[in-house]
């Protein structure tokens, strides 16, 4: 009976204490697991934040966001007139390649400078024109030119100080060049005689000692372009730019010659005779043969030069 009482007393005192201790241990484990879970969540959030900051730095950098890198330019082309371009090239990219490449749409025309160009041509030729021999003079020259190009620029030195402005350029050009000039002939020393000339081996003359005609060349060129140049900073975003290169084309300039047939005579070996309808056809054929010979020489010219200089602004 006494043993039963002691066992009952121990059950009342020890078992609840053991249960309480177990509950305390379980609560401690739960707290520890909760702290670990919270730390894990915090770590994940930190990683997400770090990734977001990295993405923000890489893709939201104010120095690489548009319109930074947008560029516009205007200048003069020796062979095409008033030149301009729009494009994009940003030296602030972290990427090795992105900071080295740029694109441009280039265009030029002589139309806004037509009067200035013609005045310059007239100044070079002078009032008397340019004597090309046999009493034939070229005067009143006229030039029309325009082009459009798609270009890719490569800056081999990236943004390395002043070397960063040096570039290599490739692309494709479409253009058209038209040259016309008036031909006149007059022998001052023989005002009462006739103006005579040779065409493809035959002798012709105009009664009245005066020649009027027109010479022209039309070059509808297109082809790949390869060149080099630079854009060097002046202040703020303003720069000076220059391009020099060639357009490789299989299209060459086509020559034309317009000579009147009025008052035209031909030497038949013993005397001068008037050129009739059949003779006019022969004259035109002789003119075409002479042009073909000149065209063969011109066809050897397989490239069109490009030289441009001006000012640009890069945002």
Image (cartoon, rainbow, N blue to C red):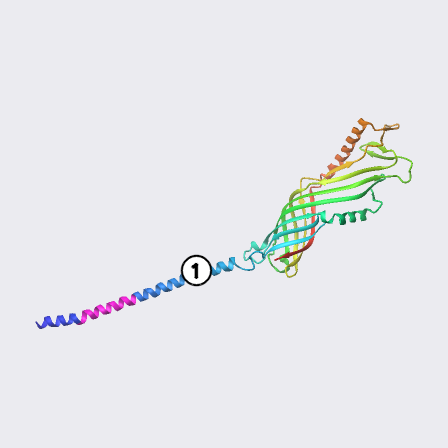
Q: Is residue 242 above or below residue 291?
A: below
Residue at the image point whose x is 76% and y is 35% from the top: 291
Q: Is residue 280 in view from this perspective?
A: yes
Tell me if 55 is positioned left or right of 77 in this view.
left
Q: What residue range appears in magenta?
A: 13-29
Which class describes the residues within 10 Å of circle 1: few (<14), some (14-19), or many (20+)? few
In this view of the protein, which residue sits in the foreground, 120 or 255?
Answer: 120
Residue 202, given in percent of the width and then of the height, sits at: 82, 31
List x then y, in percent, for residue 273.
86, 28
Picture coordinates of residue 140, whole percent (x, y): 80, 44
Which percent across, then down, holds residue 16?
Answer: 20, 69
Left or right: 248 with respect to 14?
A: right
Foreground: 28 or 109?
109
Left or right of 107 in this view: 256:
right
In this view, 121 is above or below 58: above
Residue, disc 1: 48
């Amino acid at each position: 009976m006494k043993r039963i009482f002691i066992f009952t007393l121990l059950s009342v005192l020890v078992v609840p204490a053991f249960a309480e201790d177990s509950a305390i241990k379980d609560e401690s484990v739960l707290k520890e697991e909760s702290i670990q879970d919270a730390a894990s969540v915090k770590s994940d959030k930190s990683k997400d934040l770090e990734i977001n900051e990295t993405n923000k730095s890489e893709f939201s950098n104010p120095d690489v966001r548009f319109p930074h890198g947008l560029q516009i330019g205007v200048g003069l082309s020796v062979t095409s007139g008033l030149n301009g371009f729009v494009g994009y090239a940003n030296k602030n990219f972290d990427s090795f390649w992105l900071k080295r490449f740029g694109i441009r749409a280039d265009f030029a025309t002589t139309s806004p400078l037509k009067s200035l160009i013609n005045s310059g041509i007239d100044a070079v030729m002078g009032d008397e024109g340019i004597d090309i021999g046999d009493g034939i003079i070229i005067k009143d020259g006229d030039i029309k030119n325009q082009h459009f190009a798609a270009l890719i620029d490569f800056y081999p030195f990236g943004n390395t100080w002043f070397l960063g402005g040096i570039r290599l350029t490739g692309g494709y050009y479409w253009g058209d060049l038209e040259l016309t000039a008036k031909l006149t002939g007059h022998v001052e020393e023989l005002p009462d005689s006739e103006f005579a000339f040779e065409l493809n081996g035959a002798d012709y003359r105009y009664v009245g000692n005066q020649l009027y005609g027109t010479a022209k060349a039309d070059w509808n060129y297109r082809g790949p372009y390869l060149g080099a140049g630079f854009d060097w900073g002046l202040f703020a975003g303003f720069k000076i730019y220059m391009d020099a290169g060639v357009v490789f084309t299989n299209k060459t300039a086509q020559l034309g010659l317009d000579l009147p047939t009025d008052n035209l005579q031909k030497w038949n070996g013993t005397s001068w005779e008037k050129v009739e309808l059949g003779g006019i056809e022969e004259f035109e054929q002789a003119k075409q043969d002479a042009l073909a010979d000149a065209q063969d020489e011109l066809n050897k010219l397989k490239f069109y030069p490009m030289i441009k200089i001006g000012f640009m602004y890069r945002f």
